[in-house]
Amino acid sequence: MGKLTDRIEAMAAPLAAEAGCTVWDVEYIKEAGNWYLRVYLDRPEGVDLNCCETVSRRLSDLLDEEDPIPDSYILEVSSPGAERVLRRPADFQRFLGEMVRLRLYRAREGRKELTGRLIAHDEDAIIIDPGDGEVQLPMSEVAQVRLYVEW
């Protein structure tokens, strides 16, 4: 579905720009028997409801017109949130020095989650500092990386 999400992102990007936002990510996934098309918007000062509503209405009309998805689906337009998932190299670069939480495919030293400051990242490895020294992990062991906010 990568190509579909790329196409949807290309459709949504100019609409988001008109609303003063950028497209952070697009997901097309099936959950509990329903397909969801999720478009996540971002902007430095935060995404508000008006931004989401504006993009959602315009994108919904455009999707109805172009009809790139043959199945029925639920469209959701929102902020990626404070604890957003980092996926692209630019995401990691933007948040160097910030706290992240890594979810691992398999437990390492009895833990499947690690939290620490993002020190470095490339396609092969990620380095974080959980506070007691740097830890380097191959990206092949990392299921997900999210920003971490201590509430």
Image (cartoon, helix red, strand yellow):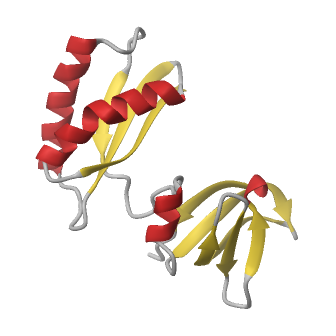
Q: x and y percent of residue 107 in the render?
A: 83, 60
Q: How many marks?
A: 0
Q: x and y percent of residue 141 in the render?
A: 78, 56
| Extreme-right residue of the structure | 109
Q: In this view, does 119 lie to the left or right of 30?
A: right
**Is 87 placed above or below 14 here?**
below
**Is 7 placed above or below 14 here?**
above
Residue visible at 34% across and 39% down in the picture: 39
Q: In this view, does 138 lie to the left or right of 30?
A: right
Q: x and y percent of residue 6 in the render?
A: 42, 32
**Is 43 placed above or below 15 here?**
below
Quarter of the rendering occupied by the C terminus: bottom left
Q: Is residue 72 left or right of residue 105?
A: left
Of residues 120 and 131, which is closer to you in this image?
Answer: 120
User: Toward which corner of the image does residue 94 lie, by quadrant?
Assistant: bottom left
Residue visible at 35% across and 35% down in the picture: 9
**Is 48 placed above or below 77 here?**
below
| Extreme-top residue of the structure | 70
Residue visible at 85% across and 66% down in the picture: 108
Q: x and y percent of residue 33 in the render?
A: 52, 18
Q: Is residue 41 left or right of residue 115?
A: left
User: Toward which corner of the image does residue 78 lie, by quadrant?
Assistant: top left
Of residues 123 and 21, which is closer to you in this image?
Answer: 123
